[in-house]
Image (cartoon, helix red, strand yellow):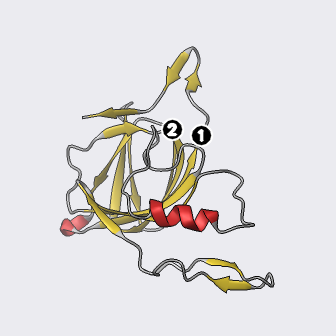
Amino acid sequence: MSTYITTHNADGKAVFSNKLPTEQHEMAIPPGTIKTIWSSHEIPINLSTEADIDQYKHDSTSAFFPGGRRICPDRGSSVIVMNMKPGGVEKGVAHRTMTLDVILVLEGEIECHLDSGEKRIAKVGDFIIQRGTMHKWVNVTPNGGWAKWVGFIQAVKEPIKIGDKELGPEWAH
C-alpha cells in the first residue's frame, strides 16, 4: 500500500512530496498491525509550509500518539489502517478515546461491541461511526481470515457530557 503526499513548489504548482518513502511503516500491536497513513496536530491545518509533513514523518514511526487520545493527536486528526489477526481480539480491550472515528471495512468482517451489550458486524464497504463510546473490536472474518479497516479519526472536545455524567478516556483490560 503506497501513500503519495502532494504539496506545492516555489511557483505554487502542485507536486508530489519526496520527503517520505511511499511505503509507510507498519507497527505490530497485540491485535495485529497498525499503520498511520496521515496525521495533523491542528485544525484547521496550515498548508502554507510543510511543517505538517515534517510532523507526520515523526508520527508515522509510532503506533500511538502521546496524550489521552492515543489514536490521534490531542488537537488534530489521523488516518490509520488496522489489520486484525484471525480471531483477534476475542477477549478484546474495551476502550473509549476522545475521538470521532469513521471506520470503513476494507477486508473481512469486524464486530463492534458496545458497553451496553449491543453488537454490530461490519462487512466490506460498511462504515461504523464511533462517537467517543466505550467499545471493542473483534475480527469475525469467516474461515480465519484477516480483517482490514481504515479509520479517519478526529479529536473531540472533552469531556463528553451525557446528562450530568462526564465520560473521559478509558481502557479496560
User: For residue 136, what is the image quadrant?
Assistant: top left
Left or right of 63? Residue 154 is right
How crowded is the residue under tag 1: few (<14 C-alpha within 10 Å), some, or many (20+)? some
Query: Between residues 105 and 94, which one lies in front from this camera angle?
Result: 94
Find disc 1 in the rendering and name its residue: 156
Please state the horizontal and vertical placement of residue 91, each as a whole percent of the image: 20, 43
Q: Residue at x 59, y 40 (%)?
A: 156
User: For residue 88, what is the image quadrant?
Assistant: bottom left
Left or right of 136? Residue 52 is right
- Badge 2 element: loop
**From this viewpoint, which residue is outermost toward the top?**
164
Image position of 59 with respect to 143: above or below:
above
Q: Residue at x 52, y 63 (%)?
A: 56
Q: Residue at x 25, y 55 (%)?
A: 31
Q: Residue at x 46, y 59 (%)?
A: 59
Image position of 158 with respect to 154: above or below:
above
- What's under tag 2, amino acid-wise? Met
Separation of disc 1 and disc 2 at Cα? 6 Å
Left or right of 153? Residue 42 is right
Can residue 104 be seen in this snapshot?
no
Look at the numbered discs 1 and 2 and tell me whether their residues touch, using CB distance below 8 Å. yes
Image position of 165 with respect to 36: above or below:
above
Location of the N terminus (image quadrant): bottom left
Please state the horizontal and vertical placement of residue 157, each as a whole percent of the image: 61, 35
Please state the horizontal and vertical placement of residue 3, each as a whole percent of the image: 50, 78
Find disc 2 in the rendering and name its residue: 98
First in sequence: mark 1 or mark 2? Answer: 2
- What's under tag 1, amino acid-wise? Val
Location of the C terminus (image quadrant): top left
Query: Between residues 90 and 10, which one lies in front from this camera angle?
Result: 10
- Badge 1 element: loop
